[in-house]
């Protein structure tokens, strides 16, 4: 019976997590946050907070809090989630590095790009090691790091990374994929900034890498 309850709960948690992602994608992050909160409560009751499912869901919620503009909540939850994931899952688990990435994005938005840079660099290196250089998530990690470097005023370094993002995205996703077009737009914006003495340090738009629901 316990095994059956675990299975039923896992399905409910997974479906609720997927529904949350769909709500955010449709432009309703508030409803997405509510759905994620319900999924976390279900997972915690069944398995406790220190399990991969609950940790991944909390990482997802960091991302949604960031979309909602609740920067303090995103940063605080991100800090707790990274600490818990490192303790429970270890440094080389993909959930840990997804949590690190989401914390870094929250730090960028909250005005701490220097610390965000360190985390982005660590996460990018881990993604290359664990997933490979041409994995879509690794490409997104590179884009996130490039945006952070641009915000810090390192436009040349950001340009080099965006150039590699555009090249890899074209190879992996295809020339007509929206992710490739965004990468090319980012590269063009940074190129313009390098030729303009009055360039702004506001980063170009780019994809944020959400946490992964197991």
Image: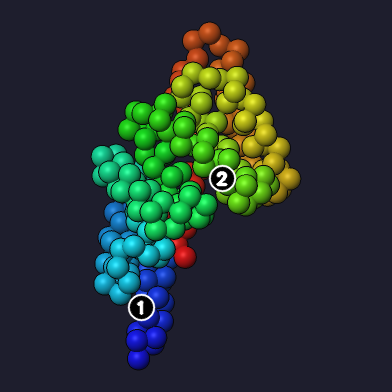
Residue 136 sits above or below residue 57 on the image: above
The reply, left or right, for residue 145 in relation to residue 19 is right
Dot 2: element: helix
Instruction: Residue 149: give its label.
Output: none
Q: Where is mark 1, residue-wise?
A: 9
- Between residues 38 and 1, which one lies in front from this camera angle? 1
- Between residues 80 and 69, which one lies in front from this camera angle? 80
Dot 1: element: helix
| Residue 22 in sight | no
Residue plotted at (49% across, 10% down): 198
Instruction: Residue 126: give its label.
Output: 2
The reply, left or right, for residue 26 in relation to residue 156 is left
The reply, left or right, for residue 40 in relation to residue 163 is left
Rendering coords of residue 161 (x, y %): 62, 30
- Between residues 3 and 25, which one lies in front from this camera angle? 3
Residue 30 sits above or below residue 107 on the image: below
| Residue 198 in sight | yes
Q: Mark 2 or mark 1, which is nearer to you? A: 2
Rendering coords of residue 49 (x, y %): 30, 63
């Amino acid at each position: 019976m316990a095994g059956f309850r675990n299975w039923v709960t896992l399905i409910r948690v997974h479906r609720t997590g997927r529904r949350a992602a769909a709500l955010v994608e449709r432009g309703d992050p508030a409803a997405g946050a509510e759905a994620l909160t319900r999924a976390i409560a279900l997972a915690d009751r069944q398995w406790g907070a220190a399990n991969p499912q609950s940790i991944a869901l909390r990482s997802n919620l960091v991302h949604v809090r960031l979309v909602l503009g609740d920067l303090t909540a995103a940063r605080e939850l991100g800090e707790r989630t990274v600490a818990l994931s490192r303790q429970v899952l270890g440094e080389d688990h993909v959930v840990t590095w997804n949590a690190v990435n989401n914390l870094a994005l929250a730090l960028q938005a909250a005005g701490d790009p220097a610390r965000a840079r360190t985390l982005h660099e660590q996460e990018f290196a881990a993604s290359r090691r664990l997933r490979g250089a041409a994995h879509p998530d690794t490409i997104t990690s590179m884009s996130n790091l490039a945006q952070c470097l641009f915000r810090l005023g390192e436009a040349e370094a950001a340009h080099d990374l965006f150039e590699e993002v555009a090249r890899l995205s074209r190879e992996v996703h295809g020339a007509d994929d929206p992710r490739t077009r965004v990468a090319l737009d980012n590269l063009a914006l940074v190129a313009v900034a390098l030729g303009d003495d009055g360039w702004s340090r506001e980063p170009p738009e780019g994809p944020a890498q959400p946490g992964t629901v197991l």
